[in-house]
Image (spheres, rainbow, N blue to C red):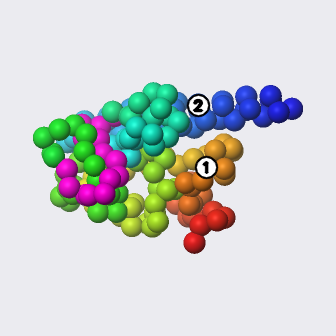
Amino acid sequence: MIKALLIYAAAAYLIDVVLRPESIAGRARLAASRRGKPLLNVGCGLPGSSLRVALLGPTGWGDTNCDIASSSSCDLSVRTCFCDITSLPWGDKEFGAVIASHVLEHVEDPQLALNELHRVADEVFVITPAWWAPHTWVHPGHRWYIRADGTSTRLWGWK
C-alpha cells in the first residue's frame, strides 16, 4: 500500500509539475510570438527552491525569466532576473504573454499577483497545483488552493 502511494505521488508530481507546465509553456510561447512581443516567465525557480529545480534546473521558458528575491530591481539586459510577482518592474503590456507556473499558491495575495501579470502581458498563463496531486496539500509553502475558476481557499496553517 505504501509503495503504491509513493508511486502515485511521484507520478502526480511528474505530470503536474513537469509535463503539464512544459505543455502550457509552449502555448504561452506561441501566444507571445503571435503578438510579436517577448514571453515573461515569472517564478522560474532558484537553486534550492523546489524539487523540480533541484532535478531539472530553473525553467527557461521566457525571453525574460524571473523569480523572487529581496529586491524587485533587475538587470533587463540579461535573460534571468529577480522580481516580486506583486510588483513587477516592467511597463504595461510589455510582454505578449506571461507564464507563472506553481507560483500563485505561495504568495500572500494571489489576486494582487494576478493583477500584475495581466498588467504586464497581453495573455496570461497560470498553472497551479492540481487537486488530485498529493503535493498540493502537503507542501509547507502552499498558502492557497486555487481552483480552475480562479477562486481560492486558504490552506490550513496559514493566516
**What's the amino acid at mark 2?**
Leu
Query: Which residue is denoted by mark 1 in the rendering?
Result: 139
Return the x and y of residue 157 as percentages of the image width and height: 64, 65
Q: CA distance from mark 1 to mark 2?
A: 15 Å
Other residues around mark 2 within 10 Å, as few (<14) / some (14–19) / many (≥20): some
Return the x and y of residue 47 as percentages of the image width and height: 40, 37
**What's the amino acid at mark 1?**
His
Is any atom of residue 104 visible in this view? yes
Secondary structure of the magenta portion, mostly? loop
Query: Which residue is denoted by mark 2 in the rendering?
Result: 14
Return the x and y of residue 14 as percentages of the image width and height: 59, 31
Return the x and y of residue 57 as percentages of the image width and height: 41, 30
Q: Is residue 72 above or below residue 67?
A: below
Which numbered disc flags the more N-terminal residue, 1 or 2? 2
- Badge 1 marks a residue whose secondary structure is loop
Quadrant housing the C terminus? bottom right
Magenta segment: 61-74
**Residue farthest toward the right in the current orientation of the protein:** 1
Left or right? Give the position of 13 relative to 88. Answer: right
Q: Is residue 20 above or below residue 131?
A: above
Q: Residue at x 49, y 47 (%)?
A: 102
Q: Report the disc number at residue 46.
A: none
- Badge 2 marks a residue whose secondary structure is helix
